[in-house]
Amino acid sequence: MNNIVTTTEVQQKIGTITRSIDQETYIVTSHGKGKIVMLPYFDGCDRNMAEYMEDYEMIKNKAKLKAKYSKSRASGESDLII
């Protein structure tokens, strides 16, 4: 289950969060907006984090990517032969 906490609560309750992170996940907010996701660590999770960051970048830049690919598609096929 996700717990929503503020940055201030993280500072005040870091010990409690650390003890419960195996059973709970946390979304940290700042000024009412989600900023950080806190998940438990396990050996080998680095690969998952890399995939998450790739997905994050794709979603964050979705509008820019759509515009770029629409422009590319509209320009037609290239004469370049490889």
Image: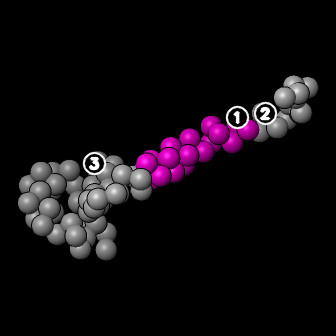
Q: Is residue 14 visible?
A: yes
Vertical arrangement, residue 57 with respect to residue 24, above or below: above
Mark 3 or 2, nearer chain start = 3
Local SS, label 2: helix
Residue flagged by tag 1: what amino acid is it? Lys
Q: Residue at x 82, y 38 (%)?
A: 73
The reply to whether callout 1 and callout 3 are in contact (CB within 8 Å) is no
The residue that label 2 is drawn on is 72
Which quadrant of the figure contains the C terminus? top right
Can you give x and y, in whole percent of width and height, for residue 56 in the image? 48, 48
Q: Name which quarter of the figure residue 64 lies in.
A: top right
Q: Residue at x 51, y 51 (%)?
A: 55
Q: Residues within 10 Å of mark 3 (few under 14, many from 20)?
A: few
Name the residue at the top extreme. Answer: 80
Q: Is residue 51 left or right of residue 12?
A: right
- Most prominent secondary structure in the magenta stretch? helix
Find out whether residue 66 is within the magenta segment: yes
Residue annotated with mark 1: 68
CB under 8 Å between discs 3 and 2? no
Dot 1 crowding, Cα within 10 Å, few <14, some 14–19, many 20+: few
How many numbered marks does the figure carry?
Answer: 3
Distance in Å between CA atoms under marks 1 and 3: 32 Å
Query: Residue at label 3?
Result: 30
Assign a secondary structure to mark 1.
helix
Q: CA distance from mark 1 to mark 2?
A: 6 Å
